[in-house]
Structures are given as C-alpha cells and as structure tokens.
Image (cartoon, grey):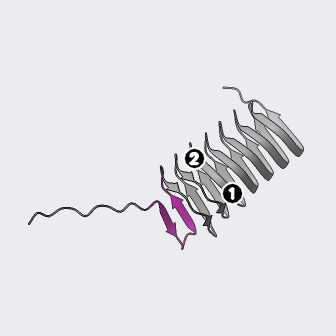
Amino acid sequence: MIRTKKPEIKKDILVDKNRKVMIIRKNAVIGRKIKFDGKVIVGMSACVWGDIHCDELNTGKNTILSGNVKCRKAVLGSRTEFNYLSAKEVILQNRCKGKHLKAETAILRKNVSIEKLESETAYLDGVSSLGEVLAKKVVASKTEE
C-alpha cells in the first residue's frame, strides 16, 4: 500500500479569541460579512467582498475592500482600494484609492486618491488627489526625500 501525505487544508481566516485577533491570510478571497470584536489583520493582496465591522483594522498592501468598513481605528497599507470607510482614526499609506472616507482624524500619505473625504481633522503628507473635502481643519505638508 502506498502512503501519501494528507493534503494540507489552508484556512483563509485564523482567529485567536484570547488575544481578540483575526488574521486573513495573504491572497485570500473572502465573500462574506466579517463582524469581530477585536483586531482584524488582512494580509497583502487579499480581497474582502463583504462588510467589515471591528475595533481595529490593519491591511497589507494591494488589498481590496469592496464592502463597507466600520471600525475605531484603521491603518491601510499601500495601494489598498476601498469603497466606504468609517472610523475615528484612519491612516492611509501611499497610493490608496477610495470612494468615501469618514473619520474624525485622517492621515493621508503620498498619492492617495479619494472621491469624498469627511473629517474633523485631515493631515495630508505629500501630493494627493481628493474630490470633495468636508473638513474642519486641514494640515498639508510635503516630505523631502
């Protein structure tokens, strides 16, 4: 009888309830809604089609968030695309693209493209493309390289 190895079952979502952490692996495609009381970490080049509701969201680069995202704090890696993002504090890395961003504090790095920005305070670091801006305070600066 020939013995073969069992195929490895690769789960796209890993959850640690003790630490309150959910990890979505890189290159994963998730087609459902995610509601988690804790931190959600999305690996690079992953695609989430459903809505995300969590305390904190961190994404790697080249991530696609097609649904609505609601969280307390969000840090999106470079070249991440999103439709709607609502959070208290948002940090968008280089070349992120989005349709609607609603935040109390938004920090935008270089070459960020957003169609509509609603924010109490917006910090713009470098040249970015913004459509409609609704903000009480905007601070713009350019970093030297």
Q: Quadrant of the N terminus?
A: bottom left
For the residues marked 2 and 1, what is the alpha-carbon distance in whole angstroms?
13 Å
**Which portion, as a residue range, is magenta?**
11-27
Q: Quadrant of the C terminus?
A: top right
Which image quadrant for residue 32? bottom right
Q: Which residue sits furthest left?
A: 1
Mark 2 Cα-neighbour bin, 10 Å: few <14, some 14–19, many ≥20: many
Residue designated by label 2:
63
Q: Is residue 142 left or right of residue 18?
A: right
The residue located at (39%, 60%) in the rendering is 10
Residue designated by label 1:
69
The residue located at (59%, 60%) in the rendering is 40
Q: Position of residue 47 (x, y in %)?
A: 55, 51
Mark 1 Cα-neighbour bin, 10 Å: few <14, some 14–19, many ≥20: many
Q: Is residue 49 left or right of residue 11?
A: right
Q: Amino acid at mark 2?
A: Thr
Q: Position of residue 91 (x, y in %)?
A: 70, 47
- Disc 1 is placed on an element classified as strand
Q: Position of residue 98 (x, y in %)?
A: 70, 44
- Disc 2 is placed on an element classified as loop
